[in-house]
Amino acid sequence: MNLAARILLVLASLSGLLGVGLSAAAAHITGGNLATAAQFLLFHAPALLALVALMAAGAVNPMLAQIAGYVLVLGLILFCGDLSRRAFSGAALFPRAAPTGGILLMLGWLLVGLSALLRLRA
């Protein structure tokens, strides 16, 4: 992968990180809802598929990208799980589940970017 493509991958991961942060802020302002959880799941599904493709192509550090993917999944479980449970039952998944999930999602996106910068040389 050339430098221009690597820079775009890092910028994409920054976009994901900031998108999660702004979405979380919006959810706190409006109280969050089921649509937010659905959107997060739908937006992250292709991102996770792309991450797997990048790993298979050798474009990213495979270990760091794998960790990033699992951190993103755990963040989705906590953030979307909490919003969904609140929407259906009015109760939180557990205290601070959504913010913890949001932080994990942002960390996952940061790790995606780092996996592009720290790609192992073939």
Image (cartoon, helix red, strand yellow):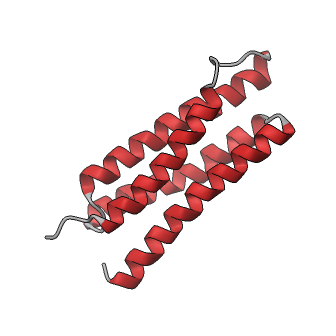
Q: Position of residue 22 (x, y in %)?
A: 71, 52
As displayed, is residue 109 above or below residue 77? below
For the C terminus, the quadrant is bottom left
As displayed, is residue 33 above or below residue 106? above
Quick check: 75 left or right of 81? left
Q: Position of residue 99 (x, y in %)?
A: 63, 34
Quick check: 62 left or right of 8? left
- Residue at 35% in and 82% down: 3
Quick check: 89 left or right of 76? right
Q: Where is residue 67 in the image (x, y as percent from the top left)?
A: 34, 44
As displayed, is residue 71 above or below residue 64? above
- Residue at 30% in and 59% down: 55
For the N terminus, the quadrant is bottom left
Q: Quadrant of residue 9?
A: bottom left
Q: In which quarter of the image is residue 60?
A: bottom left
Q: Position of residue 8 (x, y in %)?
A: 47, 76
- Residue at 84% in and 41% down: 29
As displayed, is residue 85 above or below residue 115? above
Farthest-out residue, left: 122
